[in-house]
Image (cartoon, grey):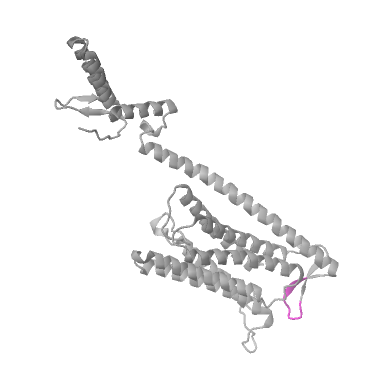
Amino acid sequence: MDGHVVLGFGFILIGLWHLFNHIKLHTLNTTPTTNTLWFPFPSPKLKYLELLFILASSTIFIALELFISPSHHHPFDPHDGSIPSNHLHNFEHASMSLAFFVYAGFALALDLVTASSKETVRAELTLLLAGIAFAQQLLLIHFHTTDHVGPEGEYHFFAQVVVLVSLATTLVGIGLRGYSFLVCFVRSVSILFQGVWLMVIGFVLWTPSLIPKGCFMGDDEEGRHVVRCEDDVAVRRAVSVVNAQFSWFFVGVVVFVMSFYLVLIKWYGGEKRRMTMKEYGCVGEGGVVMKDDDVESQRKSIELIGNVRYGDDGVGKSDLGDKETKQKGESGSGSEKSGASESESSSEFESRRFEKFGIEIGFGV
């Protein structure tokens, strides 16, 4: 039980971390050049926190399986040093974590040693290492020494399905040239769901009150704890219960993930909008977002000032002012001076207003 829960908790944290970062990149339109598999922590000193967490979690899981859980606190037979049959599954579980330990270790080494010009190759090798870890996990679950029959077999069958999705999306990422949000999104969800399902297995199969009706926890001929059922009717009922549980947890994860997506889209979408408005001068002093009327007024000011040009006398004149000047020139020199004065006053006023918001415009000469 301890091993399933610890491993499941680690998968949940990694899945959430990946999901958060991929949605954030997607919302801010910050597209990586490669299909990245791990994300650096914002703090420079904790850049490799994700990889270090995988290394530490794998070490703890291996210690639980091989040294803490066994009654003798070591996995070997005290008489001849061989591996007892009832501890073979401990070695299989530890081997799964060992594969992820190798992945995290080499991913860390590749990032430290490989030059930035080899970023694509580094990302592909990292994906390959993760694919190897998922493949080993899938094979060890499928060829498990424990006789997975009845409800226990059904739990592990669905675990294989989820791991297969993680493996497939990881391998697909190797062949993609560029970043695919959908592939990374599905992979992150599958990692998260792996953790959820492993924790379900750990709690249900080792908690007598959660075992399906008609089934019980017992020991097989080799002394391993297994779940047995009274008859075929109880087996069929237990399997149906497991199928229903998988469906419920799957729908629950989908609801959570989509809600998580919508929340981050709204949060970082608003941040992106504020950044864009600030860039285009739609944010006033103190970071206060201007009202729509103010923004429209600014837009009209930009359009007006965009038509201003400077003459030989250094005075800004607009095309609109020139047209008015020509029309008023026909009625007399007094009207022409008045029109020029109004044009000059208007352009100077708009220039001062525009400079207040710190926006630079290039004027034609």
Left or right: where 157 falls relative to 230: left
Where does residue 255 sit, x and y in percent of width and height?
A: 63, 49
Relative vertical location of residue 180 with respect to residue 230 in this rendering, above or below = above
Determine the image quadrant of residue 169. bottom right
Relative vertical location of residue 236 with respect to residue 358 in this rendering, above or below = below
In the image, the segment drawn in magenta is 220-227
Where does residue 296 sit, x and y in percent of width and height?
A: 40, 27
The residue at 36%/39% (across/down) is 279
The residue at 19%/10% (across/down) is 332
Relative vertical location of residue 286 with respect to residue 333 in this rendering, above or below = below
Q: Nearer the viewer, residue 3 or 237?
A: 237
Image quarter (top left, top right, bottom left or bottom right) of the N terminus: bottom right
Q: Nearer the viewer, residue 182 or 98?
A: 182
Q: Is residue 62 visible?
A: no
Determine the image quadrant of residue 342. top left
Relative vertical location of residue 238 with respect to residue 271 in this rendering, above or below = below
Q: Is residue 284 visible?
A: yes
The residue at 85%/66% (across/down) is 233
Q: Is residue 226 magenta?
A: yes
